[in-house]
Amino acid sequence: MAHGATLEKMKAAASIIVAVIGIVIFYLKQASLPSTAPTPPGYPLPPDSIEWTSPPYPFTEWLIDTLKAPVINFGLSLPVISSFVNHRLQDRASTSGSNRPYNLSCKSDYTSWESLNDRSYFGRHLPPKEIPDLPPVDEVVKKLFPRKDGIQTMCPRSTLLFPTFAQHLIDSFINTKINAETGEFEWDKTDSKHEIGIGPLYGDEVEQTNQLREKSEAPGRRGRLKTQVLEGGEEWAPFLYNEDGTKKKEFSAIHDPDGMKTILGLVYSSDPTTKSSIEQSIFAFGGRRANLNPNIVAWNTLLLREHNRLAGEIEKSEPGWDDERVFQTARNVLIVMYCKVCVVCISVCLHLIMHNIC
Ligand code: HEM
């Protein structure tokens, strides 16, 4: 009896010691986190903005984060319990998303065989419904993007690269169809290829891709995309337009950048010199929005150079391959690298959202 009581006391003492050590580790970890992430020198904060400060890290969240994986792994190591845990995990994973195809699409207000199959229509999560009395846009924006005291919070943990990559990824597969004759959006339709094929660089159609390729069998040039060398000896995409503003014949299948003609016409109609110099700086990329801003051009250029670098490496290791095979292999490798960046980017995104960081 006395022996049992001593054992119980020892167990209680051990639990208290483990709990104290846990709390000490938590506080040490929290103390080691910087309370603010200082803006790097040389980058002053814009006016009316404040520096981001780490939100407090709740103890319960830390406890769950720390214990989740060991507890699951322990469960998976036990003979009988492991299959139960395994089933529960698999069930959760397989039922966490909706089945595809979605039963509703913009094809019709009801489900039909065509609405399930025709991927040129956008899918719907909710049935169509007239919504009267929508709140004013300003109010919605304020609710979605609240700013404490109207001041923006600068986040030194993220950079312009983040929205640039997001924009580039989205441009690969979210494409509302534009009516070729009227130039207007067809809001219920999409001409997306529904794949991550790096369309903004290579184009969505084979004809576009072919026009962007060098298509040379010369050793040292196989599988390459067309480029030009600009001042400073750097490799860039070729320009899309001739000096007189007409599109180069070799790029006849490449889209004019979205909205470019309208915007240039509106803003620079009385300034033909500036209009022409802007047109001259448009690059021949596959996507309609690939020239939208300097950062998206930089990102496309990085991918273009990486494609040509990969083609060089592949050609060196497989000297018997022709241009076609080197090109297709380099593209596939680049797509896999791109997907890897996507996964990292999405993980970072989830982390930032979960910890309310940005
Ligand atoms: C300076 C930055 C940006 C500029 C100038 C820009 C410009 C445009 C333009 C001109 C369009 C075509 C639609 C239209 O003509 O009305 C568009 C569409 C779109 N943009 Fe951006 N954008 C920028 C950044 C971004 C970013 C960061 C994202 C996402 C993270 C994004 C996501 C989208 C989406 C989803 C569409 C609609 C695509 C479609 O349905 O076809 N954009 N943008």
Image (cartoon, grey):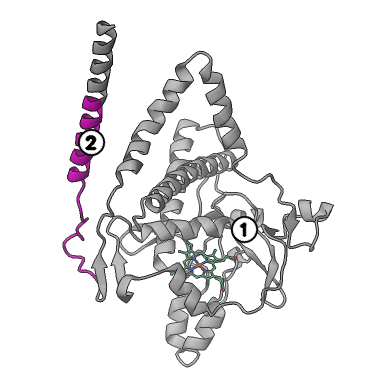
Closest to the observer: 261 or 236?
A: 261
* Amino acid residing under circle 1: Gln
Q: What secondary structure is found at the residue carrying circle 2?
A: helix
Around disc 1, counting alpha carbons within 10 Å, would you say few (fewer than 14), some (14 to 19), or many (20 or more)? many
Marked residue nearer the N-terminal end (1 or 2): 2
For the point 33% across and 64% down, the residue is: 231
Assess whether residue 76 is covered by the magenta stretch: no
* Left or right of residue 265: residue 230: left
Residue labelled 1 has its Cβ within 8 Å of some atom of ligand 1: no
User: What is the x, y in percent for residue 115?
Assistant: 78, 56
Check disc 2 and give the amino acid type. Answer: Ile
The residue drawn where x is 50% and y is 44% is 339
Residue extent of the magenta highlight: 16-45
Q: Is residue 111 above or below residue 258?
A: above
In this rendering, does residue 291 appear at all? yes
Question: What residue occupies the far bottom of the structure in this picture?
Answer: 270
- Residue at (48%, 63%) from the top-left corner? 238
25 in magenta: yes
Q: Label 1: which residue?
A: 208
Q: Secondary structure at mark 1?
A: helix
Q: What is the x, y in percent for residue 302?
A: 41, 54
Give the x, y percent position of residue 135: 56, 78
Where residue 288 appears, as percent x and y from the top left, is 56, 66
Report whether the residue tagged 2 is closer than 8 Å to ligand 1. Answer: no
Position of 249 with respect to 313 (left or right) is right
User: What residue is shown with label 2?
Assistant: 23
Q: What is the spatial separation of the Cα atoms under label 1 and label 2, in whole angstroms?
A: 60 Å
